[in-house]
Image (cartoon, grey):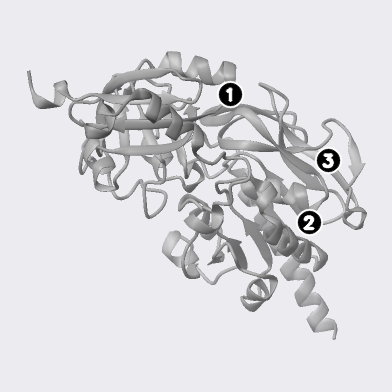
Amino acid sequence: MSTLTQETALLVLEDGTVHRGRPYGARGATLGEAVFTTGMTGYQETLTDPSYARQIVVQTAPHIGNTGVNAEDAESRAVWVAGYVVRDAARRPSNWRSERSLDEELEAFGIVGIQDVDTRAVTRALRTEGSMKAGIFSGEQAERPVAELLAEVREQPSMAGARLAESVTAEQAYVVEPADHGWEGEPVATVAAVDLGIKAATPHHLASRGIRVHVLPADADFAAIQAVEPDGVFLSNGPGDPATADAQVQVLREVLDAGLPYFGICFGNQIFGRALGFGTYKLPFGHRGPNQPVMDKESGRVEITSQNHGFAVDAPIGEVVEAPEARYGRVEVSHWSLNDHVVEGLRLLDRPAFSVQFHPESAAGPHDSLALFDRFARLLAERRAATSATTEGA
């Protein structure tokens, strides 16, 4: 029997449950919030999604790693998950685009994982009890007393109250040009995109529509946004508790007060909700995976969406109301989950601003919601036309 098969790894949940398996990726110890994702594909996009920072991700799909990994499919500069839990890890990748195995990728980024775990049992526990604090221990760490490991798991900080966007954002601003993403001709608009944990596919979709994207760090203030002379503002997905995003809420209020078109996704949706005066709350186990059904109020269509969030906006579904921050006028819940009626989108009726809780960039996932980028592009065109008309009139 090889040394690999003799090694033990432990997944320890805060309820005291211990799942035994074998090491996967780096050896050592890691702590985080255990969550599950229901995607059958797109594991590389999942691992490189900054929204998973400080989370131990459990894959419900049993076979993981079959197609390996490659540089092209990464959604950011790193693997962000705190740990990784799979049932049947591929012994070797088999795909013409593969550059290395998933096991090698996890080890390169120092991600401690575990394989040969009954992920169905773990998922059922998380669905019943909610997301839990957890830890993965392998190598010498797995030889420590379980009581000691459990105490370490329980003592770690909760995800509620965690401020994480600043830890995953770009260190410096950068520009994504339309010409580099298939657009021919001059840019049709400029957007300031605040990076709270942005995925590479998002500025790609904006740029492919002729939009020049200035990606700004999470701590960008309104002056930094104004400096790029944008036609609109975008707030990205990202990790952490939206209740900690007071600075971004204030900046977004300044954006709305200036009349700039706004589009937000995921964390950007939660910040939008807070800017309008609504509260946010933590979901029991969240929505994660590229197969989440959502109702679009305007079209009456059911869209299958890609999601990754553990918090949601507390707003009334099915009616148009005045925003708690009354200066923003009327607001409606534009999308909601068909699984549990969680708010999945907001839209102002008196200002050019909207957001969705899911990930329309579809990396990975279905393309049902790509038209949201076209909606934003139309708002930007209208803003630019109105600005030009005002300038010519003066």
The residue beneath circle 2 is: 352
- Residue 64 position within the rendered picture, expressed as x and y whole percent measured from the top left: 31, 27
User: Which residue is situated farthest in the bottom direction here?
Assistant: 394
Q: Position of residue 292 (x, y in %)?
A: 58, 27
Q: Amino acid at mark 2?
A: Pro
Can you tell which of label 3 and label 1 is closer to the viewer? 1
Residue 125 horizontal side relative to residue 255, left or right: left
Q: How many angstroms separate mark 2 from mark 1 (CA)?
A: 36 Å
Q: Is residue 31 visible?
A: yes
* Residue nearer the viewer, 245 or 295: 245
Q: Residue at x 31, y 33 (%)?
A: 113
Query: Is 261 above or below relative to 132?
Result: below
Q: Which mark is residue 332?
A: 3
Q: Please state which of the two labelled residues, at mark 2 or mark 1, is closer to the viewer.
A: 1
SS assignment at label 3? strand
Residue at the far left: name it.
1
Residue 212's tag is none
